[in-house]
Amino acid sequence: MTNPLTLFLRGDRQADRVVPPSGHTAWLTSFTAGAMTFLAVFALALALASGRMADRWSDALARTATVRISAPPDQIEMQTRVVLDVLATTPGVESAKALSDEEQRKLLEPWFGPDLPVEALPIPRLIELTETAQGYDAEGLRQRLAAEAPGAVLDDHTRWRRPLATAAGRLRVLGYLSILLIGGTMAGMITLAANAALAANSQVIEVLRLVGAQDAYIARAFVRRFTLRAFTGALAGALLGMAGIALLPSADAAGGFLTGLGFSGAGWFLPLALPLIAAIVAFAATRRAALMKLRGLM
C-alpha cells in the first residue's frame, strides 16, 4: 500500500495538468511564501532575543544593589566608611565595594566620553553590594543608612528590573504576534492565488468533470502544487533570513545596540520549522479554497 505522503509528493501526472506549472499564480505563491517566511525569521529572532535579554539582565540585577552617597566633599569619605561598616554587619549582604573614580568614569564613559573629570565634579560616591541567596531586609537597611549615613540612598534595582521585564515580555509577545499575522497574510495570498488558478482553468475542470473526475481528485492537484510551491518559497525565505541574521554585527561590534539579536546553539534549527508551517498553512488554505471554488463552479 502506498504511503499517503509519498503519493502526495509524487502526485498524479494527469491531475497535475489541471494546475498551470508557471504563470502569475506560481510566482505569486512562491514569492509570498518566501517573503513572509523571511520576515517571520526576523520576528522569531526578535522574540527569542527579547526573552534572553530579559533573563540576562534580570539575573545580572537580581542579586546586586547600589548605595548612592550624596554628601559634602569633606564628608564623603567618612560616610563611605560608615556605609561599608553597616553593610559588613547586615545579614544577607555577601560583599560590598566602593567604586573608585576610574570605575565610575567607565560607567559614565558611554554618555560623556572618556575624558570626564570625575574627581572635579560633584558626582555621588557609589557602593556596589551583592546579596546572598537568602537576600537582605531592604527596608531595614534603608532605615539603618538613614540613621547612620544621612546622605546614603539604597537602590535595589527594583525600578530597573520591573520595566525591563515588562518591555522584554511585550517584545516577545509582539514577535510571536507578528508571526501569526505573517501566517494569516500568507494564507490569504495563497488563497487568492488558488482561486485565480481555479478560475483560469474552469473550462479544463468542466471537461474533467464530464469524463468522471471527482472534485476531491481535482482539488488534490491544486493542493499538492500550491503546497509544494509554498514550501519551496518558504525554504528559500528561511535560508535568506538565517543568512541575514548571521551577517548582523555582534553585540560588541554594534556597541551593544543589537544585544543578543539572533539565534544560538540549537536555536538555529527553529527557523527551519517555518517552511513546514508554511506548507501546512498552504495545504489548509488551498484545500478550503479549492473545494469552495469547485462547488461554486457547479
Image (cartoon, grey):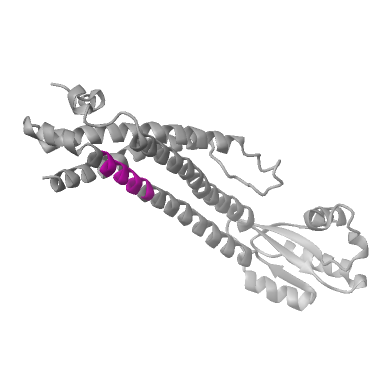
Looking at the image, is 23 positioned above or below residue 187? above
Helix, strand or loop: magenta stretch:
helix
In this rendering, would 279 be left or right of 82?
left
Range shown magenta: 185-197
Looking at the image, is 137 positioned above or below residue 209? below
* Total labels drawn: 0
In this rendering, would 113 be left or right of 62?
right
Identify the residue at horizontal 61%, vertical 35% (top origin).
247
Q: Is residue 153 within the magenta segment?
A: no
Identify the residue at horizontal 74%, vertical 77% (top origin).
146
Residue 277 screen position, x and y as percent = 35, 40
Classify residue 61 by image quadrant: bottom right
Classify residue 186 by image quadrant: top left
Closer-to-camera residue (218/207): 207
Closer-to-camera residue (192/232): 192
* The C terminus sits in image quarter: top left
In this rendering, would 46 be left or right of 278?
right
Residue 236 visible in the picture: yes
In this rendering, would 142 be left or right of 98?
left
Q: Residue furthest front?
A: 203
Identify the residue at horizontal 63%, vertical 63% (top origin).
160
* The N terminus sits in image quarter: top left
Q: Is residue 189 within the magenta segment?
A: yes
Looking at the image, is 58 positioned above or below residue 39? below
Residue 273 visible in the picture: no
Identify the residue at horizontal 68%, vertical 71% (top origin).
141
Residue 86 screen position, x and y as percent = 75, 67
Closer-to-camera residue (267/228): 228
Residue 14 screen position, x and y as percent = 18, 24
